[in-house]
Image (cartoon, helix red, strand yellow):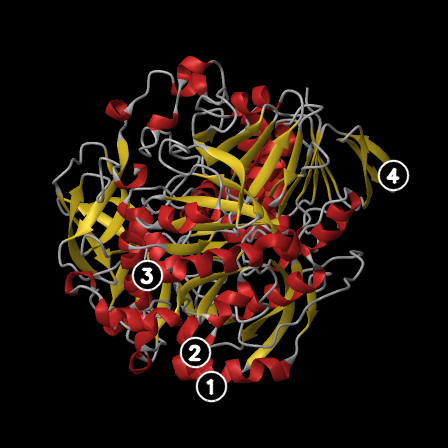
Amino acid sequence: MTRVVIIGAGIVGANLADELTLRGWTDVTVLDQGPLPLTGGSTSHAPGLVFQTNPSKAMTEFAGYTVRKLLDLGCFHQVGGMEVASTAARWEDLKRKHGWATSWGVGAYLIDPDECVRRWPMLDQNQIFGSLYVPTDGLAVASRAVEELIKRASSRGARFAGSTRVTGIEQANGRVTGVKTHDGEIPADIVVSCAGFWGREIGEMAGMTVPLLPLAHQYAKTGQLAELAGADPVRPALPILRHQDQDLYFRQHGDRLGIGSYAHRPMPVDTFAEPGEVTASAMPSMLPFTEDDFAPSWEESKLLLPALGRTKAEEGFNGIFSFTPDGGSLVGESSDVRGFWIAEAIWVTHSAGIAKAVAESIVDGRSETDLHELDVHRFEDVQLAPEYIRETAQQNFVEIYDVLHPLQPRLSPRDLRVSPFHARQRELGAVFLEAGGWERPHWFEANASLLKDLPHDFLPPARDAWAGQFHSPIVAAEAWHTRNGVAMYDMTPLKRVEVSGPGSLEFLQGLTTNQLAKSVGSVTYTLMLDDAGGVRSDITVARLEPELFQVGINGNIDVAYLRSRAPEGVRVQDTTGGTCCVGVWGPLARDLVQPLSAEDLSHTGLKYFRGRRARIAGVPVTILRLSYVGELGWEIYTSADNGQRLWDALWRAGQPLGVIAAGRGAFNSLRLEKGYRLWGTDMTTEHDPYEAGVGFAVRPAKGDFVGRAAIDGRSEGTSARRLRCLTVDDGRTVVLGKEPVFVDGTPAGYVTSAAYGYTIGRPIAYAWLPGSVGIGDQVQIEYFGRRVAATVAAEPLVDPGMERIRR
């Protein structure tokens, strides 16, 4: 029987013990340095508000599961949730949020000020435009839930030990073997840290960086309110309430109100009190209330709820919560110490859902809900620096209730990772957005003059001001020149590894769906599946030598996965930082590159999906005949020290041809016109290859591979849902992604990727829809509260015969 030790008996640890024992894993020990059941961690003082709707499908599902489970335990007051808008911008954002709720299957309603006041009589309706109302939201009684979960897990065999401090993680031969405590060692095959804001220290014991920062957050309680006189002291009646325009939330405590504020300065917490005697008003996670920080929030609260003017904030505390560099939770197994897992930075809202997902991952090898947004390995090394974690976690605290655009970049820190082409891009007026620490050009101001010469049908319609914040019409010129001339794209940030050593081919064959046993020089698009047949990544594999492969992957999650599976003798090396890549694409690409190389770059000399080592203008390169934009051309790789020289040589040679530098805006539009998927956005482990439209990359006849048995017998014809290409009928509405799609007036799916298609002169959206929806069918997309007509289109929209790319 597998021995599991869980560190932390708060809402996450207790839920995980419950979920593991539910699945028959009964040798479970839960340790906490504080007394049971009130351990003194964040759970012990959590206000318990559960607002389910989230831009993340996964987080919404986790919140929904938490609601259902806590209801079943009798530890949830389903009073509903309201998010009010006091500005026009917030009201528009609530319309977008209503779309998310619809996409993810949460019943939600936009209600007017009169209805808001009916549900929350103390509201000043003159202060608000309306609210988003979700009847199934409510209040978790977290401390009582922990007691019930402990009882239930204990009845199945789990053991709970309070006042037991963990002092070390034992390991041998790259595997966890146990946990050291002041009372001795506890053997374990699996250890899961659910230690909350102590999670950093537990991670360090296993040699794992846990990128979280504990921060204090203010919570106060008012005096008695006449409007709530006689209220049940245990069962609240008012909906939970958010006033995000002022970074506030409210809940009822009998005849008083509780007020939470994120409006104050960030307050990092670097040291914690010892968890000695813990009471409801004294615990390590509760710091003294700083009244001056709360004063502005109190004034704003009185504006929204005038009745507060007749009372005062009688008590309060600064409670400690965990924040991360991107605001997400942290889940995953160490890539260095097998069997050591973390489940950290998880709030009550998502606690049961994430615990279920972690239990599924441990017991079954996969979670039903895709976890890539939570995977602890999602961060680049530069994002694990203490200074980065500290600054960005505080930013996330400040921005927690802000209205943020999907492309909103950080203002700081910036310029952490730049390609060797960066200086040249700045000279061309690149507008950079940031992702994964990389500076990525989205368009170039140097191309603005090209707009005047664009054909009329290539000029896009104007976008609404908010949605178009990080867009420029210059993108149209860059797309046109890629389709009709030649453009250079910086592809350096795309992650790549070298897989080498004896057994490399067999290793990759066993993890991927396509046939890789090809000649040196072959390049193959293939998938990595999980055991249930879900797409865990799509990759390109270039065979450069018999036992050396360059693999283009989707990020650090893939690096950790490949390393965890690599047998002895096979090396997986991340080469991204030491190399760079420029994509040279367009009908004139060969005219630009061929004169610079002695290699035969004709169609027969270097066929589509072939690669080789070569020299371009004397620079040693690896050149792969690939195109993510659907035009003739190559991905050209070289070492970072040769990068600027390569760029300059290509740029000089391209001047007579009108070469331009182009950015991610054009890139995204062109790839959607060709129907190329983006993993993590268009498809995840929740989708199989045939549903996602990438079944062509599956070759079952090649032999066994991860997920092969699970997809046996499946096909596009058997798929109950499909990723479909939509074109927007009005020709001008460019949606953002995650909007609900309606079929015959009923919500039936959601948008994944979207962009304006400059070549076809219409906006494009990809969406998950029922398999019964076919080419030519009419659907509607809900965009900021209005329905936009769209048509299911055959894909690809541009060059379906692939003639352009195979010239």
Task: Kindly state the secondary structure of the residue where label 3 is placed.
Answer: helix
The percent position of residue 547, horizontal first and vertical second, equals 61, 25
* Mark closer to the chain start, 4 or 1: 4
How busy is the neighbourhood of tag 2: few (under 14 within 10 Å), some, or many (20 plus)? few
Marks 3/4: CA–CA distance: 66 Å
**Residue that mark 1 sits on:** 310
Residue at 39% over, 23% down: 698
Marks 2/4: CA–CA distance: 53 Å
Type of the residue with mark 3: Glu
How busy is the neighbourhood of tag 1: few (under 14 within 10 Å), some, or many (20 plus)? few
Of badges 4 and 1, the one in the foreground is 4
Residue 798 visible in the picture: yes
Say above or below: 23 vs 11.
above
Q: Which mark is residue 478?
A: 3
Residue 400 visible in the picture: no
Closer-to-camera residue (709/705): 705
Q: Marks 4 and 3: in contact by CB < 8 Å?
A: no
Q: Which mark is residue 367?
A: none
